[in-house]
Image (cartoon, rainbow, N blue to C red):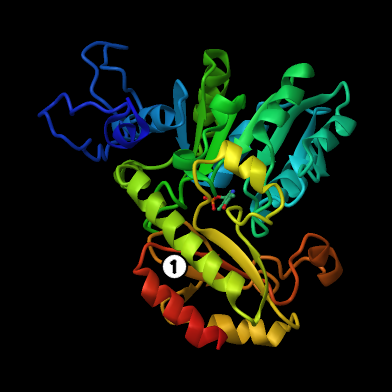
Amino acid sequence: MKFNTKTIHGGQHHDPAYGAVMTPIYQTTTYAQTTPGGHKGFEYSRSKNPTRSALESAIASIENGNYGMAFGSGLAAIDAVIKLLEPGDEVISTSDLYGGSYRLFTSIFEKFGITFHFVDMGNASNIEKYVTKNTKLIWVETPTNPMLNIIDIKACAVISKKYNLMLAVDNTFATPYLQQPLDLGADIVMHSATKYLGGHSDVVMGVLAVKNKELADKLYFIQNASGAVCGPQDSFLVLRGIKTLHIRVQRHCENGRAIAQYLNKHDKIETVYWPGLENHLNHDIAKEQMKDFGGMLSFTTKGNNYNEAIKIVEKLKIFTLAESLGGVESLAGHPASMTHASIPKKEREKTGVVDSLIRLSVGIEDIDDLIADLEQAIG
Ligand SMILES: *Cc1c(COP(=O)(O)O)cnc(C)c1O
């Protein structure tokens, strides 16, 4: 089955009870047994729920994995991955990763004796310097937020195999339509399904997909034992979202490209960060490992003025000033005053988050309206 068919049918079957084409929302905690242990595969909805199971097999299918797991949020999914580790273990992580992942690693898991090394992976060979006998996991996020840095997943997989480490990839920004890390050698792929998989800004969820059965069993155990699962209604929404993933992402990419090109020519704009631009750092790697370049982009204005950037995001009318990304509607954010406000200016500027940086999650509205909106806001 090809990807555009898998989003609709992958891992799916009509509901056995009445033949419902769409998996129903099994809003139930428990399941009748005919004799103790005599059930149809479902006992209690933390362990397994039919709506969640349908979503989990769809996730496995679209990521070319064999097993999928769904959690109450993206961070709950990451939490489950780190719980594979033990005190004394070390993780090598992308340096400019999602702020919530950084907080989870440093504020929660370091307390339990796990060490995290945050490494610039723009050149994957940097990773090798941090490998010790205690290293267990490489955590990669690509493209990164908000600078859209690109990391070579295949090169990371070579290193993880050489030292017998696990390689996990946060594939939230790319989506499985654009990038399939398991095929590039990753062991675990993770998504904040809150973003493109759900796609409509109406559900918070996280998912994992893996190929290996032993690893899947360990993650299922953690999913059930820690219990950070998502509910059946949310599972239904993401299952529905995935059915249009391919056409949505196609339009996100088209609109992203048009806006990147528009901004790139604009005389008030200093730099545009979009992996599809030829001068973007590691554009060649993006071209190799991604099918297209997505709808996330960032830009800075000439003069790098903090207040001017705030004015621009306030003036936008179709782009909503909001956190999050990946929905059908366009969103704009100002990292220096929003997502990265708690990081000292000197620190955030090291990674490129300067005062005038604006991040766009380009939606699937008409491109003429989006460009007209940017035009009136930037002037
Ligand atoms: C949003 C996000 C997360 C966290 O997901 P939640 O669903 O908000 O918990 C992790 N990684 C990336 C890249 C994200 O954008």
Q: 261 or 333, which is in the foreground?
A: 261
> Which quarter of the image is occupied by the C terminus?
bottom right
Residue 113 appearing in the image: no
Q: Quadrant of residue 317?
A: bottom left
> For the residue labelled by badge 1, is the local secondary structure a helix, a strand or a loop?
loop
Residue at point 56% right, 13% down?
214
Residue at point 21% right, 38% down?
24
> Which quarter of the image is occupied by the N terminus?
top left
Give the residue at the far left of this rendering.
Answer: 18
In the rendered image, residue 110, in percent from the top left (x then y), is placed at: 79, 41
Figure check: 156 above or below 174: above
Left or right: residue 375 versus residue 126 is left
User: Number of marks in the image?
Assistant: 1
Figure check: 326 above or below 224: below
Residue 112 appearing in the image: yes
Q: 242 or 301, which is in the foreground?
A: 301
Figure check: 39 above or below 354: above
Asked if the residue at label 1 sits under 8 Å from ligand 1, the reply is: no
Q: Quadrant of residue 122?
A: top right
In the rendered image, residue 318, in percent from the top left (x then y), is placed at: 41, 77
Kindly identify the amino acid type of the residue bearing the numbered disc 1: Ser
Which residue was labeled with disc 1?
Answer: 330
In the rendered image, residue 204, in percent from the top left (x then y), is placed at: 45, 52
Q: 119 or 337, which is in the foreground?
A: 119
Residue at point 69% right, 26% down?
157
Q: Within 10 angstroms of label 1, few (less than 14), some, or many (20 or more) residues?
A: many
In the rendered image, residue 137, in percent from the top left (x then y), is placed at: 73, 29
